[in-house]
Image (cartoon, rainbow, N blue to C red):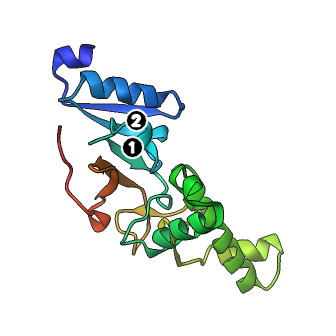
Amino acid sequence: FKIRLKKVIITLAFFDMPESGILIKQFHSICRKSLLAGIISPATPEYAWNATSGAVEKLLLLVLEPGPIPIKQIPRSVEFNKRYGEFWGEKARKKLSCHGAGCAYDAVYVLVKAMEKAGTKDADKVVKELEKIDMNGVVGRIRFSKEHQLIFGYDPKKSAIACIFQWKKPGVRVPVFPIAISEGDIELP
């Protein structure tokens, strides 16, 4: 209610609970001139448009691990979505959360590649090969820092990325950031 009275332009929300879908509907009904953005897990799957009766429209969401969102500039994310739907069914694919699925999918390929290059399952030898990994995955280019952390940036050809997408009519998730993967501009309420 205070948001509406104070004429807030943007509201950042970070929710992981299934009940946050109710918050989206409430926000949509009382704060039509404020942009809702953040990490709201129940709003990221493809089915969220129908589940909220379109209340996710114009919602900006940060996705830390692309993969469940097919991004044209990351062919492996498109392939992942297609394969997931073929294996588990379209209903399951449309409910695919943006937490972990992309990285988990990539992790299997990364580990197998490192084990093949090491020629063994010996942990020390596999780690040495993991340190050299340079491959494309559903999160972009996969390489690790000296601290063994995935390297993130803004261009999936150079690094792994997080992305921001916006829900647009007629229920489409449109990547809007980083610029290297953008398929549209941010629309304001």
Q: Are marks 1 and 2 in contact (CB under 8 Å)?
A: yes
Query: In what quadrant of the picture does the C terminus appear?
Result: top left
Q: Residues within 10 Å of mark 1 (few under 14, many from 20)?
A: many
Q: Position of residue 52 (x, y in %)?
A: 40, 35
Residue 71 seen from this side = yes
Q: Position of residue 125 (x, y in %)?
A: 77, 77
Q: Is residue 115 left or right of residue 20?
A: right
Residue 136 higher or lower than 176, as above or below: below
Residue 53 higher or lower than 112, as above or below: above
Q: Secondary structure at mark 2?
A: loop
Q: Is residue 137 left or right of residue 177?
A: right
Q: Amino acid at mark 1?
A: Trp
Residue 141 seen from this side = no
Query: Of 39 and 68, which appears nearest the observer?
Result: 68
Q: Look at 71% across and 71% down and name the residue there.
A: 127
Q: Position of residue 101 (x, y in %)?
A: 59, 57
Name the residue that disc number 2 marks: 52
Q: Look at 32% across and 25% down and name the residue there.
A: 27
Query: In what quadrant of the picture does the N terminus appear?
Result: top left
The Cα atoms of the two marked residues, 1 and 2, are separated by 5 Å
Q: Amino acid at mark 2?
A: Thr
Q: Quadrant of residue 53?
A: top left
Q: Look at 44% across and 26% down and name the residue there.
A: 22
Query: Of 89 and 41, which appears nearest the observer?
Result: 89
Name the residue that disc number 1 marks: 49
Q: Position of residue 11 (x, y in %)?
A: 29, 30
